[in-house]
Amino acid sequence: MKIPRLQMLKLELKTSRIEALTDGVFAIAMTILVLSFEIDVPKDGPNIEALNDVLFNLFPEFLHYVESFFLLSAFWIAHHQHFNFIHKSDRGLLYINIVALLFICLIPFTTSLVGDYGDFLPAVLIFEGNMLIVGMIFFYHWEYASRNNRLIDKELDPIIVKINRQNSLVIPVISVAAILLSFIHPRWGTTVYLSLPILYLFLRRDR
Amino acid sequence: MKIPRLQMLKLELKTSRIEALTDGVFAIAMTILVLSFEIDVPKDGPNIEALNDVLFNLFPEFLHYVESFFLLSAFWIAHHQHFNFIHKSDRGLLYINIVALLFICLIPFTTSLVGDYGDFLPAVLIFEGNMLIVGMIFFYHWEYASRNNRLIDKELDPIIVKINRQNSLVIPVISVAAILLSFIHPRWGTTVYLSLPILYLFLRRDR
Amino acid sequence: MKIPRLQMLKLELKTSRIEALTDGVFAIAMTILVLSFEIDVPKDGPNIEALNDVLFNLFPEFLHYVESFFLLSAFWIAHHQHFNFIHKSDRGLLYINIVALLFICLIPFTTSLVGDYGDFLPAVLIFEGNMLIVGMIFFYHWEYASRNNRLIDKELDPIIVKINRQNSLVIPVISVAAILLSFIHPRWGTTVYLSLPILYLFLRRDR
Amino acid sequence: MKIPRLQMLKLELKTSRIEALTDGVFAIAMTILVLSFEIDVPKDGPNIEALNDVLFNLFPEFLHYVESFFLLSAFWIAHHQHFNFIHKSDRGLLYINIVALLFICLIPFTTSLVGDYGDFLPAVLIFEGNMLIVGMIFFYHWEYASRNNRLIDKELDPIIVKINRQNSLVIPVISVAAILLSFIHPRWGTTVYLSLPILYLFLRRDR
């Protein structure tokens, strides 16, 4: 098979590679979210009070775990929604994906940070900013691929391009709302994301 | 390829994607079960007494590791048994899978909790409850896919639908038994799962 | 596609699934070997003496890392050598694979144990025993699949069956040698595995 | 399918296997880079000063995270660039890949080391040496596969072989520069890698 020189220079990776790396990163990020759950055992052996303390302290972390898990799921679904229609890759798309992964890999850390310091504005803003950045990268990801049908099928229904663009805005918009609310009260901001599953059910059912 | 608008709106992901993410999560969950095994080294260097302590303290954790490993394997087999027959996906199936993964990712944590606090009812119930929930989600997973042949082949032998339903009930039933026994003695409850490999060999051989 | 009832009852998973889970477990086990490398930082900030201590203490752990990495690689190659010729699966093969994974997932732990307690016989025997068990499971894996051409192609050259059987014996034999040497001196036992790469180069070149 | 005896003896693994393991290792290495970010919480509960300390101390580690993430991405892209053209494997290629993975798996550790001890020459040299070694292995990887068209298509445009060779030299050359600069000042050395993304954009655009 004689690969055209131009194609080589354009750094066209098969999309299956990008998807494999991305699926791996999502699977790991989801699974290691839980590694920040600390289980302290007293030196003189376990006892029921220590266990109750562990469980009581884990409750806010558990809420943040659920939150981050649904956010990661939403990003993963978005990624695959896009690649349902993207059938080739170029250097730009590759770089967008790598920058997206850079911030997705941070999510277990920012989740852990907000789990420990959920009452403090800087920690909350870092968590929400992380989600805003990933959301905006994914919005740009679709813009880049679909503009002038650069990397998608030329015959793709324009309605689908539009729906994907609108869906890509959900998390950025929620994140801006969360950030604004955080300035009133840090805990309020992160609570906004818990509305995500309900929001998705409604948003998509209507169409 | 012109993708029908309706299909897009229904959020039909290729089942291969769901399987790739799920395989990744299972592989990681199985592997990080062991991360909770702590190896303490005295400050003045390792010695044989410290090593014996480490090994002695790890023994109950090791049993829980084996237990959780077989449970994860059983869930993984169930997942693939289902996807042997599920050839398309819809939004409902996708959401069921994500909620299943949410609780599967918790298994390394609940295993570690019961490893440290195996004599205390709350820890044991959280572990067993985790298994019950995953088991019930997988039971519903098959119900959802097979009801009225929604996502499976219309010509699939009804016996196979029935066998899959029965197999999906094994872990929920064992989990309920484990929970009840835990109220008599916490250690008894978790021991029930160790019967799982033997049970599977017998259950399936008879048919 | 009407799947035969018998095939369902035999629990025939596609081999691609088993391979995907196995590749995932190997990739993770290889990568988290390094998580046991501890980097202590003094409370009053890093200094050159502390760094030298860290590096000096890590040296034996690094050797065990290399050792375990090559052992995991050898197991991974063996697994794929087998699946080059195994084109279908049954319940027995599935269970053999799961038990193999159970012990492969222990390797990061036993590596870490021997890294910390490499001068003590129990730790060394646990490490070498782990390798012996995985090696023996893989030997049985090939025996099970190839006996009477159960799961391999009927026209497969018998020489290949034989070569695979012989290759599967390399790690068990080395492990027995390592265990015996460990009784003379614990450090000697684990050193044996460092000969593995050289051994492989020679063993296979001759044929 | 009768597999030729010779092919078996040559240990020809399907390249898809090597790629699957490699993708897994890269995904995990990228994701666990963040596990070294420590979030200390004071015993008397979290407070804003402790949070500021955590964030302040994490800043240099974050820079090294970004650096290592881009380096891992560059290696991953190189690996897939090579496998775009490598359509069969032999024992030599397999061993080169395993040694490459051995050093790639070390990157989370050496990143963490330079994050903690970034002002000290030995730590910096270990990090840069790690990158140099991986870079050189990947250079040799392409040399091995392309020399006399051993494992690539015979009709592949020689220009592409040459471009791949040149691209493979980028990281080794940068690493040598980084090592030399480190002797003047440790922090300068690691800073060099931050130029990588910009460098890549320019280097490749020109052709």
Image (spheres, coloured by chain):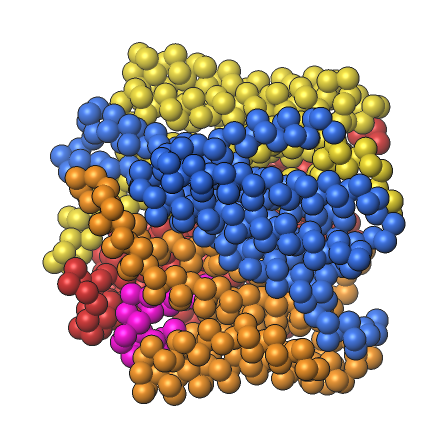
Chain colours: A red, B orange, C blue, D yellow
The front one of A94 and C1 is C1
- Whether residue B132 is visible to the viewer of this picture, yes or no, is yes
Q: Is residue D59 left or right of residue A199?
A: left
Q: Residue at x 80, y 57 (%)?
A: C148
Residue B57, above or below C115 = below
Spot occupied by residue C125 in the image (x, y as percentages of width and height): 40, 46
Region in magenta:
B105-127
Q: Is residue A104 left or right of residue D42?
A: right
Q: Residue at x 47, y 49 (%)?
A: C130
The front one of B13 and B62 is B62
Please check the rendered image and state whether residue B113 is part of the magenta-colored stretch, yes or no.
yes
Spot occupied by residue A109 in the image (x, y as percentages of width and height): 36, 50
Q: Quadrant of residue D201?
A: top right
Question: Looking at the magenta stretch, what is its main secondary structure?
Answer: helix
Q: Quadrant of residue D79?
A: top right
Spot occupied by residue A194 in the image (x, y as percentages of width and height): 40, 69
Q: Residue at x 14, y 56 (%)?
A: D43
Residue D163, above or below B126 = above
Q: Quadrant of residue B205?
A: bottom right
Please check the rendered image and state whether residue C104 is part of the magenta-colored stretch, yes or no.
no
Residue C182, above or below B63 = above
Q: Is residue D136 left or right of residue C151?
A: left
- Whether residue A191 is visible to the viewer of this picture, yes or no, is no
Q: Residue at x 42, y 82 (%)?
A: B178
Quadrant where the C terminus of chain C is found in the figure:
top right
Quadrant where the N terminus of chain C is found in the figure:
bottom right
Residue C204, above or below C73 = above
Spot occupied by residue A191 in the image (x, y as percentages of width and height): 35, 67
